Amino acid sequence: MLSKNQLGFLYMFLSICAFSVMDIIVKWSHNYPVGEVLFFRGFCGMITIFFIIPRDRYLNFYKTNRPFLHLKRCVSGLIAIVAIFIALRKLPLATVVSITFAAPIFTTIMSIFFLSEKVGFYRWLAVIVGFIGILIISEPGFNSLNIYYIYPIIFCLGLSYVAIAIKQLSSTEPVWLIGLYFSFSILVMSLFTIPQGWIFPNLKDLFLLSMVGILGGLANLWLTQSYKYSDVSLVTPLKYLALLFAIFFGYIFWSEIPSSKTLFGATLVIISSIIIFRREIYHKKQVSITRHE
């Protein structure tokens, strides 16, 4: 039998693997409209959630006392997921993943305005270091006026508010309900993109597109389970494995080799997020959710 901390490690590792494979499929699916891929993320993501709804909530699973906060979480999440889907299609995999590590930087700033938190010297220092890292990673985009480098940053902004909203919602709402509303919002929004021209997939592509939703749903659930069974301080550092996966898969499938500047900038962003993470532990605050889409 595995201990609770070992279970936490296992669930976090599974979550990282699921997100990494989902990113690969999203990048592969560039021939399909973004709205169509979002449909599969929303529809198939809902299927995974329905399996964990408690029996006593089958008849009223949709009820909530905080609909407006759910709406704000869904809108910010939609902005984040659309941005990351576009970024994955247009930029090297390792570049996108590197910039997404900057989400805690934006969460720190937003917490001042939305949670009235006080940010001390070390976390401000981490924010500055993180922004320098983002600028170094994004330099090719600035030089070539490549607007797609802005999309991972938009993702970080959206995800930052998602983390704050989930922190507020989780005090009264079950995790599955938060995920269910988000998946439903993705599904509804995707239907408005049908006039843009969806493509009917063959069986192989249908399976892969469906996996975007299934993996996304499972990744979120495994992430939550990881935090449930283990101390956040033990399992959160595992998230940086995602960069190694991105470098490996980017090279294998698309012959992408990250530049030394990208790796240096990613190192600064990771150092920044670790400083923020350690200061949150020091002040005994709930650590922001790393990725929840």
Image: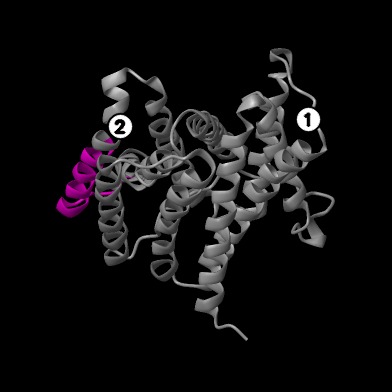
Q: Is residue 248 above or below residue 96?
A: below
Q: Secondary structure at mark 1?
A: loop
- Residue under numbered circle 2: 138
Q: Quadrant of the N terminus?
A: bottom right
Is 272 inside the magenta-drawn segment? no
At which x and y percent is residue 259? 30, 40
Identity of the residue drawn at 41% across and 71% down: 234
Q: Are marks 1 and 2 in contact (CB under 8 Å)?
A: no
| Colour scheme employed for the rendering of this structure | one colour
* Residue occupying the point 46% across, 51% down: 248
Mark 1, Cα crowd under 10 Å, few <14 / some 14-19 / many 20+, is few
266 or 190: nearer the viewer:
266
Q: Quadrant of residue 111?
A: top left
Task: Determine the residue located farthest toward the right in the rendered image.
Answer: 59
Quickly name the residue at label 1: 201
Could you tell whether 45 is left or right of 268 in the image?
right
- Between discs 1 and 2, the one toward the N terminus: 2
Q: What range of the chain is rendered magenta?
A: 116-134
Residue 254, above or below 240: above
Residue in the picture at 81% in, 60% down: 56
Report x, y in % for residue 199. Answer: 75, 22
In terms of depth relative to the viewer, which is nearer, 251 or 124? 251
Q: Where is residue 64 drawn, in percent x and y?
A: 67, 45
Quadrant of residue 78 within the rendered picture? top right
Which quarter of the rendered picture does the C terminus lie within?
top right
| Vertical relation: 280 (above or below) 106 | below
